[in-house]
Amino acid sequence: MKIAFIGLGNMGAPMATNLAQTHDITGFDTVAKPAGLTLAESAAASVKGADVVITMLPNGAILKAVADDIHPAMRKGAIHLDCSTVDVASARAVAQQAEAHDLQAVDAPVSGGIGGATNGTLTFMAGGPENAFEKVRPLFDIMGQKAVHCGPAGNGQAAKICNNMILGITMIGTCEAFALADKLGLDRQAMFDVVSTSSGYSWSMNAYCPAPGIGPQSPADNGYKPGFAAVLMLKDLRLSQQAAKDANADTPLGKAATELYELFVEAEGMGELDFSAMLPRFEKRSRS
Ligand code: NAD
């Protein structure tokens, strides 16, 4: 398969490198020029003759600008596979535009972070036509370990932001509970042993425990170096709130989690720390 890959940042570069082991890849990025990949002079030049064009970009506005640029230059029948995390409305607009150019679009944001991108163990959640999903499945198999078809255009993004809204809420809940347990004189290891095998368990507690030295290795054991930076969690929570507004859905805890990460990242300047660094934040606070 001939593939173009646009957006060669922290995630895109290792994903493209994994694909380049078995496929003909031409990459493009306005800034990054990673070694070992064949690069084009422009986005439009990179997509010439490609069967699949993958984008891995920062947000929906940039995705739409790149789509305007590349869709007219793509071969009819080719697939635009967007793996960025963007708002549902942008994903659906890009899919509609692709169709108008006789292209197919699949939105397939990922879970698994830079480690998953490097090791080829990402999870993809995809929206778009079933036959397009099947055509790009071999690429998901190289870049990741699991791909779920979630329905029509935009549903991959919908799945991603719903998942990450739960993640933000459960991480905050886990951190506040640890901080409360400290003040009640409950040992953290005992807290972990109980909760991780009781009804309060979650991925945040069991697999990514925010308390240093407790549970499996996590960013808490490494000075809260990400991992998953708080600034990226804030991005995803904001997307959940934008989607909730557009769909008229009531998400009070999603809203509260967004406000708390906003405070943490913007007012308190902690955006580059892992999102589990909410625990040391709560430790320092008293009831307001
Ligand atoms: P990044 O900022 O490292 O990479 C984005 C790249 O896009 C940059 O290299 C930038 O130069 C390039 N770019 C910007 N505008 C461009 C344009 N017009 N044309 C071509 N290239 C352009 O970000 P990242 O961490 O690689 O994340 C990419 C996407 O993946 C984001 O949507 C992010 O939310 C999502 N994501 C990131 C992670 C993570 O852990 N980093 C995890 C899951 C999902």
Image (cartoon, grey):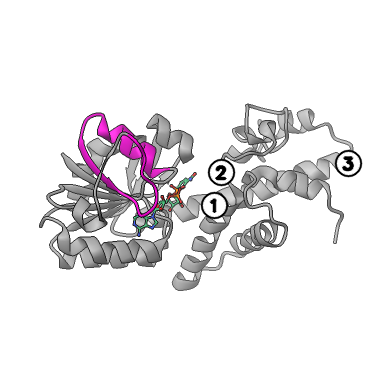
> What percent of the width, then of the height, locates residue 111?
45, 43
Q: Tag 3 or tag 2, which sits nearer the N-term?
A: 3
Tell me whether the residue at label 3 lies in contact with that at label 1, contact meaning CB atoms closer than 8 angstroms. Answer: no
Identified at 42% across, 63% down, the residue is 87
Magenta stretch bounds? 11-35
Give the residue at mark 2. 228
Is 74 rendered above or below residue 131? below
Give the alpha-carbon distance from disc 2 to disc 3, as whole Å: 29 Å
**Residue 171 versus residue 18: which sits nearer the camera?**
18
Label 2 or label 3, whichever lies nearer to me, is: 2
* Residue appearing at x 20%, y 34% in the figure: 23
The residue that label 3 is drawn on is: 184
Does any atom of ligand 1 lie closer than 8 Å to the CB of label 1? yes
Dot 2 lies on which element?
loop
- The picture places residue 103, in percent across and down from the top left corner, at 16, 59
Q: Do the residues labelled 1 and 2 touch (CB within 8 Å)?
A: yes
Image: 53 above or below 246: above
Question: Disc 2 marks which amino acid?
Answer: Phe
Residue named by callout 1: 232
Say which amino acid is labelled 1: Leu
Identify whether 186 is placed above or below 276: above
The quarter in which the C terminus is drawn is bottom right
Foreground disc of the pair 3, 1 = 1
Left or right, residue 176 beside residue 247: right
For marks 3 and 1 on the same chain, the one whose residue lies earlier in the sequence:
3
In the image, 177: left or right of 275? right
